Image (cartoon, rainbow, N blue to C red):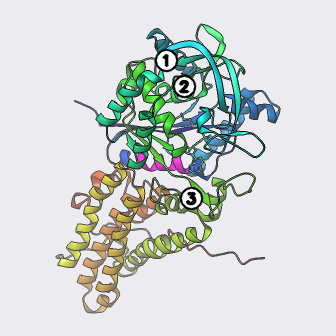
Amino acid sequence: MAGPKTFYLTTPIYYVNDVPHIGHAYTTLACDVLARFMRLDGYDVKFLTGTDEHGQKVEKSAEKAGIPPQDFTDRVSQNFRDLVSLMNYSNDDFIRTTEPRHVASVQALWTVLKDKGEIYLGSYAGWYSVRDEAFYGEDELTTSPAGKKIAPTGAECEWVEEPSYFFKLSAWQDRLIAFYEANPDFIAPAGKRNEVMAFVKSGLKDLSVSRTTFKWGIPVPGDDAHIMYVWLDALANYITAVGYPDTTGEYAKYWPADLHMVGKDILRFHAVYWPAFLMAAGLEPPRRVFAHGWWTIEGQKMSKSLGNVIAPETLVDTYGLDQTRYFLLREVPFGNDGDFSHKQMVNRINGNLANDYGNLVQRVLSMIGKNCGAAVPVPGAFTEADNALLGAAYGMLDIVRAEIKAQAFHKALDAIWAVVGDANRYVDEQAPWALKKTDPARMATVLYVLAETIRHLAILTQPVMPDASARILDLLALGPDARGFGSFGPSGALAAGTPLPSPQGVFPRYVEEPKA
Ligand code: ME8
C-alpha cells in the first residue's frame, strides 16, 4: 500500500554574517505554517531550514570579528537555531553548509556536472558584489558620486580578475524557457514569473562557478586552488538534506521539492541557476519557487545605519509569539511588500484576536461553564440559522486549503475570520443569555452550535497560532487525535455531556505602557 503523500519544503539558508531579523523570521514562519497545515492534512512533510556558511561575505565578517571562520560560523549559526525555538518552528532538519554531508553532496554534484561537460575552465574578469555574492555585467551597474560601481540592489561592486570554472548557463536558455512554459506554476507570484522569463529570454551568459582569491569554501574536486562559488554550494543544500548523492531513500521519497520559499531578492538564483544546474546534472528541478515581498519598518527600509532593524525577540517579548505569527501573515498579502507598524500590530491584536476571536471563545465557554453544568451542552434540532453557521464552519477547510496551497496565507486567514464574524453575529442574534430563562433547551442548542464552530476555528488556526489554538482545543477537552483535519465536520462533533475545564482568556488585549 502506498504511504501518505509527501510534501518537501525549504527556506533559504541564511548567511551567518549577521543576526536574524524580522525578514528571516518571516520566510521561515510562512514555511512553518505551510508545514504544519500539510501535516494536519495528512501529508508526510519534510521541512528544511539552515545556514549558508561559506563565501567571501562570511569570511570577511569572521575577519572583522577577529576569529577563525569556522568558530565564527558556529557562533552565528546558533542564533538561527535559537530562532527556531523562539518562533516555535517545526522544521524537521537544520542544515549547515559546513557539515561533511553537505561537502560530500556538493562535490558529487560538481563531479557529475564536470563529467557531463557542463563545466569548463576559463578566466573571469568582471564585477562582483560581496554583499550580494553575485556577478554583475557592466551594463547593469551605475556609478556612485564617489566613483564606485553600484549594483541594482544598491550593493557596491569590486573588479575581479582570476582563473575560474564556468557553468554553461548560456546553453540552457531555451530549455529553461521550455521548462517554465511546461510548468506554469513553477514561479510564483505570476508577476515574478514574467520578470524571470523576460530575463532568461534576454540572453544568458555562462556563469562563473569557482573563485581563487579567497579560501573559505568547498574545494573544487581535483583542483583545490579553486573553491566553489557560494551559490552553487548553497543551492545544493536542498538535495544534501535528502541524502544526495544517494538517490534512493529520502531523495527518492521527497525529491523534487514541492516548494522553495524565498525572498524576492534571491529569486533569480532559485528560478534560473538552480533548475539549470539540476537539469544539467540529470536531476529533476523543484516543483515551485515562491518569491515573497520585503518588509520595511514604519515606512523605512530596514538598515543597521538607521538603527531600525527589528529582532524577532523584540516582537515576541513585546506582543507575544502567536500574536506576532498572526500579524506577519495577516497584515500583508503574501507576495507583496509590507510595512511593520506598531499601530497596525496593536490594531490586529486588539481587534482580530482579543475582540473577535478571543471574546467569542470566552463568551461562549463562560456561558457553557455557568449555564450548562460545565459540560458540552445537549443540542436539540437545528434551525436554519444553526445549519448556516455550521455549514460555514465545515466549509472553511476547502477554502483555506486552496488558499494555503497557493501560499495566499492572508486569504486563508480572511476566510477563517469571516466565520469568526458569522459566529459573533449569530451570538448577538440568538442572544443565548436571554434564552436562559425563556427556553433553556434552545440556549443549549445555540451554545452547542457555537462550541462546534469554535472547535473548527481552533483546528484551523493551529498552523498559524499553535499555542493559542492548543489552549482553545484544551478548553473543549479535545485530545491529540481530535485535532487533525480528519476531525473536521460532523464526524468529529463534540460529544454532549463531556466535562469541560473552566475557561481561561486566550488572547489578552495589548495595553500601551504609559510613557515614563
Ligand atoms: O540570501 N523582508 O541569505 P540571507 C523580507 N544565503 N524578507 C527578508 C528581508 C526583508 N526585509 N530581509 C531578508 C541569502 N529576508 C543566501 C540564501 S539559499 C540557497 C541561500 C529573507 O541571509 C528573505 O527570505 O541574505 C531573503 O530571501 C533572505 O532573508 C535572505 O537571507
Give percent across and percent down for residue 26. 54, 51
Specify the segment rendered in magenta.
Answer: 26-36
Label drawn at residue 176:
none
- Along the line of sight, which residue is nearer the eye, 465 or 131? 131
Mark toward the viewer: 3 or 1:
1
Residue 232's tag is 2
Secondary-structure class at tag 3: helix
Q: Please determine whether, in this image, residue 229 is positioned above or below residue 451.
A: above
10 Å neighbourhood of mark 3: few (<14), some, or many (≥20)? Answer: many
Q: Residue 321 got which mark? A: 3
Q: Please state if 217 lies on the left or on the right of 447 as rendered.
A: right
Front position among marks 1 and 2:
2
Q: How many neighbours does mark 1 have within 10 angstroms: few (below 14), some (14-19), or many (20 or more)?
A: many
Q: Is residue 268 above or below residue 461?
A: above
Report how far apart the C-alphas of labels 3 and 2 lie in the structure: 35 Å
Residue 107, image x, y percentages: 54, 16
Give yes or no for contact between labels 3 and 2 (Cβ–Cβ under 8 Å): no
**Nearer to us in this view, 159 or 322:** 159
Q: Nearer the viewer, residue 229 or 345?
A: 229
The residue labelled by disc 1 is 109
Earlier-in-chain disc, 3 versus 2: 2
In the orientation shown, which residue stands out farthest toward the right? 66
Q: From the viewer's perspective, tell me whether residue 232 is left or right of residue 405.
A: right
Tell me the element at label 2.
Answer: helix
Q: Give the quadrant of residue 295.
A: bottom right
Identify the secondary structure beneath mark 1: helix
Query: What is the quadrant of residue 158 in the picture?
Result: top right
Q: CA distance from mark 3 to mark 1?
A: 40 Å
> What amino acid type should be assigned to the residue bearing mark 1?
Leu
State yes or no: Cβ of the residue under disc 3 lies below 8 Å from any atom of ligand 1. no
- Helix, strand or loop: magenta stretch: helix
Q: Which part of the image, by quadrant, shows the C terminus? A: bottom right
